[in-house]
Amino acid sequence: MNALDIQELQKIYPSGTEALKGISFSVEKGDFFALLGPNGAGKSTTINIICSLVNKSGGEVKILGHDLVKDNIKVKSLLGLVPQEFNFSIFEKVIDVVVAQAGYYGMSRHDALASAEKLLKQLGLWDKRDAVSRTLSGGMKRKLMIVRGLVHDPEVLILDEPTAGVDVETRREMWKFITDLNKQGKTIILTTHYLEEAEQLCRNIAIINHGQVIENTSIKSFLSRLDTETFVLDLAEPISNLPKSDLEIKKIDATTLEIKIAKADTINKPIKLLDQAGIKVISMHSKSNRLEELFVKLTH
Protein backbone atom coordinates (compact mmCIF):
# COMPACT_ATOMS: atom_id res chain seq x y z
CA MET A 1 0.00 0.00 0.00
CA ASN A 2 1.27 3.46 -0.88
CA ALA A 3 1.44 6.24 1.69
CA LEU A 4 0.11 8.71 -0.89
CA ASP A 5 -1.73 8.19 -4.17
CA ILE A 6 -2.63 11.19 -6.34
CA GLN A 7 -4.59 10.65 -9.55
CA GLU A 8 -5.46 13.40 -12.05
CA LEU A 9 -5.51 16.06 -9.35
CA GLN A 10 -6.82 19.41 -10.54
CA LYS A 11 -7.20 22.81 -8.95
CA ILE A 12 -8.81 25.76 -10.69
CA TYR A 13 -9.19 28.91 -8.59
CA PRO A 14 -12.22 31.23 -8.95
CA SER A 15 -9.97 33.66 -10.84
CA GLY A 16 -9.60 31.04 -13.55
CA THR A 17 -6.01 30.18 -12.68
CA GLU A 18 -5.37 26.47 -13.24
CA ALA A 19 -2.83 25.71 -10.53
CA LEU A 20 -2.85 21.93 -11.05
CA LYS A 21 -3.52 20.37 -14.46
CA GLY A 22 -4.33 16.78 -13.61
CA ILE A 23 -1.16 15.65 -11.83
CA SER A 24 -0.55 12.04 -10.82
CA PHE A 25 2.15 10.46 -8.65
CA SER A 26 2.54 8.07 -5.72
CA VAL A 27 4.71 7.89 -2.62
CA GLU A 28 5.53 4.46 -1.24
CA LYS A 29 5.02 3.78 2.45
CA GLY A 30 8.28 4.44 4.30
CA ASP A 31 9.75 6.51 1.48
CA PHE A 32 11.71 9.76 1.83
CA PHE A 33 10.20 11.71 -1.07
CA ALA A 34 11.06 15.11 -2.52
CA LEU A 35 8.32 17.24 -4.08
CA LEU A 36 10.15 19.98 -5.95
CA GLY A 37 9.41 22.83 -8.31
CA PRO A 38 10.02 26.54 -8.84
CA ASN A 39 7.90 29.16 -7.09
CA GLY A 40 4.33 29.13 -8.37
CA ALA A 41 4.67 25.64 -9.84
CA GLY A 42 1.85 24.10 -7.78
CA LYS A 43 3.72 22.48 -4.86
CA SER A 44 1.96 24.45 -2.14
CA THR A 45 -1.43 23.90 -3.76
CA THR A 46 -0.77 20.16 -3.83
CA ILE A 47 0.26 20.08 -0.17
CA ASN A 48 -2.69 22.25 0.87
CA ILE A 49 -5.11 19.89 -0.90
CA ILE A 50 -3.53 16.82 0.72
CA CYS A 51 -3.88 18.48 4.13
CA SER A 52 -7.49 19.61 3.49
CA LEU A 53 -6.56 23.31 3.56
CA VAL A 54 -7.70 23.79 -0.04
CA ASN A 55 -10.50 21.99 -1.87
CA LYS A 56 -9.57 20.16 -5.06
CA SER A 57 -11.39 20.80 -8.33
CA GLY A 58 -11.01 17.25 -9.57
CA GLY A 59 -9.08 14.04 -9.23
CA GLU A 60 -8.40 11.72 -6.33
CA VAL A 61 -6.14 11.76 -3.26
CA LYS A 62 -5.62 8.79 -0.96
CA ILE A 63 -3.50 8.51 2.18
CA LEU A 64 -2.66 4.89 3.07
CA GLY A 65 -5.70 3.78 1.08
CA HIS A 66 -8.11 6.26 2.70
CA ASP A 67 -9.87 8.68 0.39
CA LEU A 68 -9.32 12.36 1.20
CA VAL A 69 -13.02 13.20 0.85
CA LYS A 70 -14.78 10.04 2.03
CA ASP A 71 -12.46 9.41 5.03
CA ASN A 72 -11.38 12.96 5.75
CA ILE A 73 -11.12 12.65 9.54
CA LYS A 74 -9.05 9.48 9.24
CA VAL A 75 -6.79 11.08 6.62
CA LYS A 76 -6.14 14.07 8.88
CA SER A 77 -5.15 11.78 11.74
CA LEU A 78 -2.60 10.06 9.52
CA LEU A 79 -0.93 13.30 8.42
CA GLY A 80 1.48 15.66 10.13
CA LEU A 81 2.25 19.00 8.48
CA VAL A 82 5.20 21.29 9.17
CA PRO A 83 4.41 24.44 7.15
CA GLN A 84 6.98 26.91 5.93
CA GLU A 85 5.56 29.86 7.88
CA PHE A 86 5.48 29.99 11.67
CA ASN A 87 1.79 29.75 12.53
CA PHE A 88 1.72 29.12 16.27
CA SER A 89 0.90 31.71 18.94
CA ILE A 90 4.18 33.42 19.80
CA PHE A 91 2.73 34.41 23.18
CA GLU A 92 2.18 30.83 24.37
CA LYS A 93 4.71 28.69 26.18
CA VAL A 94 6.48 26.07 24.10
CA ILE A 95 4.87 23.16 25.94
CA ASP A 96 1.40 24.71 25.54
CA VAL A 97 1.87 25.11 21.78
CA VAL A 98 2.54 21.38 21.46
CA VAL A 99 -0.11 20.14 23.88
CA ALA A 100 -2.79 22.35 22.32
CA GLN A 101 -2.02 20.84 18.91
CA ALA A 102 -2.41 17.34 20.33
CA GLY A 103 -5.86 18.28 21.56
CA TYR A 104 -7.06 18.75 17.98
CA TYR A 105 -6.43 15.03 17.46
CA GLY A 106 -8.34 13.94 20.55
CA MET A 107 -5.28 13.09 22.64
CA SER A 108 -5.66 13.20 26.41
CA ARG A 109 -3.54 15.77 28.24
CA HIS A 110 -1.57 12.95 29.87
CA ASP A 111 -0.67 11.41 26.48
CA ALA A 112 -0.02 14.82 24.93
CA LEU A 113 2.42 15.78 27.68
CA ALA A 114 4.25 12.45 27.36
CA SER A 115 4.58 12.81 23.58
CA ALA A 116 5.61 16.47 23.88
CA GLU A 117 8.30 15.65 26.44
CA LYS A 118 9.77 12.90 24.28
CA LEU A 119 9.92 15.04 21.13
CA LEU A 120 11.13 18.20 22.84
CA LYS A 121 13.98 16.24 24.42
CA GLN A 122 14.91 14.66 21.08
CA LEU A 123 15.16 18.07 19.43
CA GLY A 124 16.90 19.79 22.34
CA LEU A 125 13.97 21.99 23.36
CA TRP A 126 13.01 20.45 26.70
CA ASP A 127 14.87 23.13 28.66
CA LYS A 128 12.79 25.72 26.79
CA ARG A 129 9.43 24.09 27.51
CA ASP A 130 8.25 26.95 29.77
CA ALA A 131 9.71 29.73 27.63
CA VAL A 132 7.37 32.00 25.69
CA SER A 133 7.60 30.97 22.04
CA ARG A 134 8.52 34.42 20.73
CA THR A 135 11.77 34.29 22.72
CA LEU A 136 13.05 31.29 20.75
CA SER A 137 15.67 31.65 18.04
CA GLY A 138 14.69 31.01 14.43
CA GLY A 139 16.18 27.52 14.52
CA MET A 140 14.37 26.65 17.73
CA LYS A 141 11.08 27.83 16.22
CA ARG A 142 11.68 25.52 13.26
CA LYS A 143 12.24 22.63 15.67
CA LEU A 144 9.08 23.54 17.57
CA MET A 145 7.14 23.34 14.29
CA ILE A 146 8.45 19.81 13.75
CA VAL A 147 7.53 18.76 17.30
CA ARG A 148 4.03 20.15 16.85
CA GLY A 149 3.62 18.28 13.55
CA LEU A 150 4.68 15.00 15.15
CA VAL A 151 2.94 15.17 18.53
CA HIS A 152 0.05 12.90 17.42
CA ASP A 153 2.50 10.39 15.85
CA PRO A 154 1.30 10.62 12.23
CA GLU A 155 2.16 7.96 9.65
CA VAL A 156 3.04 10.56 7.00
CA LEU A 157 4.99 13.74 7.74
CA ILE A 158 4.97 16.60 5.24
CA LEU A 159 7.81 19.09 5.61
CA ASP A 160 7.44 22.35 3.69
CA GLU A 161 10.82 24.16 3.64
CA PRO A 162 11.66 22.85 7.16
CA THR A 163 15.19 24.30 7.32
CA ALA A 164 14.60 27.70 5.70
CA GLY A 165 16.68 30.36 7.39
CA VAL A 166 18.43 28.13 9.94
CA ASP A 167 22.18 27.92 10.51
CA VAL A 168 24.28 25.03 9.22
CA GLU A 169 24.61 23.29 12.60
CA THR A 170 20.85 23.38 13.23
CA ARG A 171 20.13 22.21 9.70
CA ARG A 172 22.37 19.17 10.08
CA GLU A 173 20.82 18.40 13.46
CA MET A 174 17.36 18.51 11.91
CA TRP A 175 18.50 16.37 8.97
CA LYS A 176 19.67 13.66 11.37
CA PHE A 177 16.43 13.76 13.34
CA ILE A 178 14.30 13.53 10.18
CA THR A 179 16.46 10.75 8.72
CA ASP A 180 16.13 8.75 11.94
CA LEU A 181 12.35 9.16 11.77
CA ASN A 182 12.37 7.77 8.24
CA LYS A 183 14.54 4.81 9.29
CA GLN A 184 11.93 4.03 11.94
CA GLY A 185 9.29 3.72 9.20
CA LYS A 186 7.83 7.22 9.00
CA THR A 187 6.99 8.36 5.47
CA ILE A 188 8.52 11.77 4.79
CA ILE A 189 7.46 14.14 2.01
CA LEU A 190 9.82 17.09 1.68
CA THR A 191 9.61 20.32 -0.27
CA THR A 192 12.71 22.48 -0.30
CA HIS A 193 14.60 25.05 -2.36
CA TYR A 194 17.86 23.72 -0.89
CA LEU A 195 18.31 21.06 -3.55
CA GLU A 196 21.42 19.76 -1.78
CA GLU A 197 19.00 18.82 1.00
CA ALA A 198 16.81 16.77 -1.34
CA GLU A 199 19.85 15.11 -2.94
CA GLN A 200 21.27 14.02 0.41
CA LEU A 201 18.05 12.95 2.13
CA CYS A 202 15.55 11.69 -0.42
CA ARG A 203 15.27 8.50 -2.45
CA ASN A 204 12.56 9.48 -4.92
CA ILE A 205 11.43 12.70 -6.51
CA ALA A 206 8.60 14.43 -8.33
CA ILE A 207 9.11 17.81 -10.00
CA ILE A 208 6.13 20.06 -10.69
CA ASN A 209 6.25 22.95 -13.13
CA HIS A 210 3.33 25.06 -14.36
CA GLY A 211 0.87 22.74 -12.65
CA GLN A 212 2.18 19.56 -14.28
CA VAL A 213 4.45 16.73 -13.13
CA ILE A 214 7.44 16.92 -15.45
CA GLU A 215 9.58 14.34 -13.66
CA ASN A 216 8.84 11.42 -11.35
CA THR A 217 11.67 9.01 -10.69
CA SER A 218 14.36 8.00 -8.22
CA ILE A 219 17.04 10.51 -7.25
CA LYS A 220 19.70 8.04 -8.41
CA SER A 221 18.11 7.63 -11.84
CA PHE A 222 17.63 11.37 -12.23
CA LEU A 223 21.24 12.19 -11.37
CA SER A 224 22.51 9.57 -13.83
CA ARG A 225 21.46 11.90 -16.67
CA LEU A 226 24.32 14.31 -16.02
CA ASP A 227 26.71 14.35 -18.98
CA THR A 228 29.62 15.91 -17.12
CA GLU A 229 30.68 16.69 -13.59
CA THR A 230 32.93 19.53 -12.45
CA PHE A 231 35.47 19.09 -9.65
CA VAL A 232 37.45 21.67 -7.70
CA LEU A 233 40.97 20.64 -6.69
CA ASP A 234 42.96 22.29 -3.89
CA LEU A 235 46.71 22.19 -4.44
CA ALA A 236 49.50 21.86 -1.88
CA GLU A 237 51.58 24.59 -3.51
CA PRO A 238 50.95 27.53 -5.88
CA ILE A 239 51.47 26.87 -9.60
CA SER A 240 52.14 29.32 -12.42
CA ASN A 241 51.28 27.23 -15.49
CA LEU A 242 48.94 24.38 -16.27
CA PRO A 243 50.27 21.19 -17.89
CA LYS A 244 49.38 20.83 -21.58
CA SER A 245 46.38 18.53 -22.03
CA ASP A 246 43.20 18.00 -24.02
CA LEU A 247 41.30 17.90 -20.72
CA GLU A 248 39.12 20.79 -19.55
CA ILE A 249 41.31 22.16 -16.76
CA LYS A 250 40.92 25.75 -15.61
CA LYS A 251 43.02 27.65 -13.12
CA ILE A 252 40.88 29.46 -10.53
CA ASP A 253 43.82 30.84 -8.58
CA ALA A 254 47.41 29.82 -7.80
CA THR A 255 46.33 26.91 -5.59
CA THR A 256 42.92 25.98 -7.04
CA LEU A 257 42.00 24.15 -10.24
CA GLU A 258 38.67 23.32 -11.83
CA ILE A 259 38.35 20.15 -13.93
CA LYS A 260 35.35 19.08 -16.01
CA ILE A 261 35.03 15.31 -16.48
CA ALA A 262 32.78 13.63 -19.04
CA LYS A 263 30.46 10.98 -17.63
CA ALA A 264 32.19 8.27 -19.66
CA ASP A 265 35.62 9.17 -18.27
CA THR A 266 37.17 8.75 -14.83
CA ILE A 267 39.00 11.14 -12.53
CA ASN A 268 42.15 9.00 -12.81
CA LYS A 269 43.43 10.61 -16.02
CA PRO A 270 43.59 14.23 -14.80
CA ILE A 271 44.98 13.16 -11.42
CA LYS A 272 47.72 11.16 -13.18
CA LEU A 273 48.48 14.14 -15.44
CA LEU A 274 48.86 16.48 -12.48
CA ASP A 275 50.97 13.96 -10.62
CA GLN A 276 53.34 13.60 -13.58
CA ALA A 277 53.63 17.39 -13.71
CA GLY A 278 54.65 17.44 -10.05
CA ILE A 279 51.42 19.12 -8.95
CA LYS A 280 50.24 17.79 -5.60
CA VAL A 281 46.48 17.68 -4.92
CA ILE A 282 45.49 17.82 -1.25
CA SER A 283 41.69 17.75 -1.62
CA MET A 284 38.92 17.52 -4.19
CA HIS A 285 35.18 18.17 -4.17
CA SER A 286 32.30 18.42 -6.62
CA LYS A 287 31.76 22.03 -7.64
CA SER A 288 28.01 22.18 -8.00
CA ASN A 289 24.94 20.56 -6.57
CA ARG A 290 24.16 17.88 -9.18
CA LEU A 291 20.44 17.89 -8.52
CA GLU A 292 20.34 21.67 -8.77
CA GLU A 293 22.09 21.60 -12.15
CA LEU A 294 19.58 19.13 -13.60
CA PHE A 295 16.63 20.90 -11.94
CA VAL A 296 17.53 24.23 -13.54
CA LYS A 297 17.94 22.63 -17.00
CA LEU A 298 14.61 20.85 -16.71
CA THR A 299 12.48 23.71 -15.36
CA HIS A 300 13.94 26.30 -17.74
Image (tube, rainbow, N blue to C red):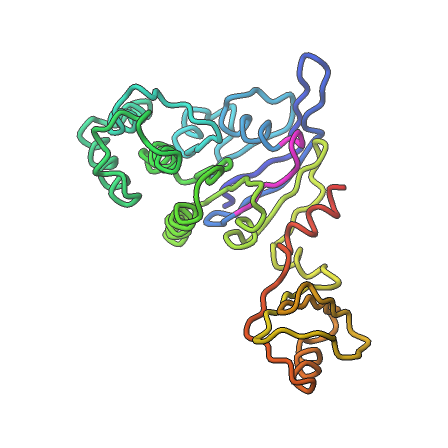
Range of magenta residues? 33-42
Q: Position of residue 186 (x, y in %)?
A: 41, 46
Q: Residue at x 80, y 78 (%)?
A: 245
Q: Residue at x 69, y 52 (%)?
A: 293
**Quadrant housing residue 44:** top right
Q: Residue furthest right?
A: 246
Q: Residue furthest top?
A: 14
Locate the C terminus and report the quarter of the image it occupies. top right
Dominant SS of magenta comes to loop
Q: Residue at x 62, y 73 (%)?
A: 238
Q: How many marks?
A: 0
Front residue of 237/175: it is 237
Front residue of 266/298: it is 266
Tell me if residue 271 comes above or below residue 6 in the rendering.
below
**Quadrant housing residue 218:** bottom right
Tell me if residue 246 comes above or below residue 45 in the rendering.
below
Tell me if residue 126 comes above or below residue 46 in the rendering.
below
In the image, 150: left or right of 190?
left
Q: Residue at x 48, y 37 (%)?
A: 165
In the image, 213: left or right of 219?
right
91 inside magenta stretch: no
Q: Position of residue 157 (x, y in %)?
A: 44, 39
Q: Residue furthest left?
A: 110
35 inside magenta stretch: yes
Q: Position of residue 212 (x, y in %)?
A: 71, 35
Tell me if residue 263 comes above or below residue 175 in the rendering.
below
Q: Position of residue 236 (x, y in %)?
A: 56, 75
